[in-house]
Image (cartoon, rainbow, N blue to C red):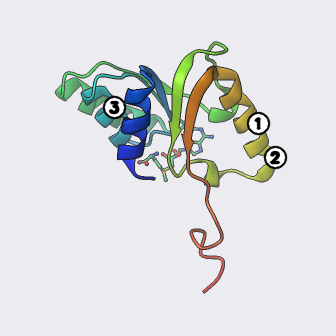
Amino acid sequence: MRIHIFFHRSKRLSFNKVIDLGCGRGRHSLLFAKNGYDVTAVNLSKYAIKELVKKAKKDRLNIECKVIDMLKLSFKDNYYDCLFTYHVISHSVSKEVKTIISEISRIVKYKGEVFVTFGNIEILSMIN
Ligand SMILES: C[S@@+](CC[C@H](N)C(=O)[O-])C[C@H]1O[C@@H](n2cnc3c(N)ncnc32)[C@H](O)[C@@H]1O
């Protein structure tokens, strides 16, 4: 996904509260925070979140960083204007994907938007 699509749409629609699901070490979260969004960054890995906390502190950015499994999101219903998840859902099996989609639709506001990448057979190198 081209990040400028996210910025273009979310600015036009006046989105502010964004959650970066499976943020890794937070390259997108940092970019969102630098561009004035109110950012929540979540990841399963304690190490990745620790690294993001360090970077955010160094850059004086206020990012809510949480170690959370995306299968059990502890956020309120209809809370986020938009959700961003880049190369994350492809790490899950089909049953989990259903749960994740259900959680995403629960925490994102009605008329909010979701920016998501899904893996495919080429990305997963199942064919030559
Ligand atoms: C390929 S990385 C992408 C990271 C980030 N989105 C980026 O573009 O830099 C996938 C990330 O998803 C995280 N992840 C995988 N399963 C997860 C889960 N159940 N809950 C939260 N994060 C998860 C991994 O720890 C990893 O950091």
Residue of label 1: 99
CB of mark 1 within 8 Å of CB of mark 2?
A: yes
Residue of label 3: 32
Please give left or right for residue 42 compared with residue 33 in the image.
right
In the depicted structure, whether residue 127 falls above or below residue 25: below
Q: For the C terminus, which image quadrant?
A: bottom right
Residue 123 screen position, x and y as percent: 56, 69
In the depicted structure, whether residue 94 falls above or below residue 113: below
User: Does label 1 or label 3 sit earlier along the sequence?
Assistant: 3
User: Does label 3 or label 2 sit earlier along the sequence?
Assistant: 3
Mark 1, Cα crowd under 10 Å, few <14 / some 14-19 / many 20+, is: some
Identify which residue, 65 or 17, lies in the foreground: 17
Q: Secondary structure at mark 1?
A: helix
Looking at the rendered structure, the kind of residue marked 2 is Lys
Please give left or right for residue 47 compared with residue 92 in the image.
left
Mark 2, Cα crowd under 10 Å, few <14 / some 14-19 / many 20+, is: few
Residue 35 screen position, x and y as percent: 27, 28
Residue 95's mark?
A: 2
